[in-house]
């Protein structure tokens, strides 16, 4: 990755650290927005990107994917991956895991 990330978070993992980085979403050649992300594991880097209709959706999808990658890791499943000494990684949960919002009641009278 050539440009610097615009946000990052560092997680504890025993004596090691796991760093996640998100790059600013940018318009891709196909018209969608692309958000590049990376996870720097103690033994290797992992990087990819997600696409969305706009920059916010691309970033939210990137955060969802990274959250899933962290939760599925052997470090998290073994209880070794934490954020500020908590198992809640404080990232948006996966969509489809419950109601995201409650729509206001309509009064059509």
Image (cartoon, rainbow, N blue to C red):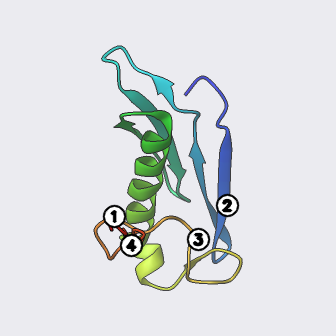
Q: Is residue 26 visible in this depiction of the protein?
A: yes
Badge 4 element:
loop
Q: Decide: few, some or many residues near mark 1? Use Cα within 10 Å; few <14, some 14-19, many ≥20.
A: few
User: Which residue does the numbered mark 1 point to in the structure image?
Assistant: 95
Assess whether mark 1 and mark 3 are in contact (beta carbons under 8 angstroms).
no
> Upstream in the sequence, badge 2 or badge 1?
2
Assess whether mark 2 and mark 3 are in contact (beta carbons under 8 angstroms).
no
> Upstream in the sequence, badge 3 or badge 1?
3
Assess whether mark 3 and mark 4 are in contact (beta carbons under 8 angstroms).
no
> Upstream in the sequence, badge 4 or badge 1?
1
Q: Quadrant of residue 42?
A: bottom right
Q: Nearer the viewer, mark 3 or mark 1?
A: 1
Please provide percent x and percent y for residue 78: 44, 84
Q: Nearer the viewer, mark 4 or mark 2?
A: 4
Q: Foreground residue, 83 or 104? A: 104
Residue 31 located left or right of residue 60: left
Tell me which residue sits at (51%, 51%) in the image: 39
Badge 3 element:
loop
User: Which residue does the numbered mark 3 point to in the structure image?
Assistant: 90
Q: CA distance from mark 4 to mark 2?
A: 41 Å
Q: Foreground residue, 81 or 94? A: 94
Please provide percent x and percent y for residue 85: 68, 83
């Amino acid at each position: 990755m050539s440009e610097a990330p615009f946000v990052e978070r560092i997680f504890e993992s025993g004596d090691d650290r796991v760093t996640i980085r998100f790059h600013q979403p940018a318009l891709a050649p196909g018209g969608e927005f692309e958000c590049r992300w990376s996870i720097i594991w103690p033994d290797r880097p992992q990087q990819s990107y997600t696409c969305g209709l706009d920059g916010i959706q691309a970033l939210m999808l990137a955060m969802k994917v990274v959250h899933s990658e962290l939760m599925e890791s052997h470090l998290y499943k073994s209880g070794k991956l934490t954020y500020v000494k908590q198992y809640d990684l404080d990232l948006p949960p996966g969509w489809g895991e419950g109601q995201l919002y409650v729509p206001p009641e309509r009064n059509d009278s």
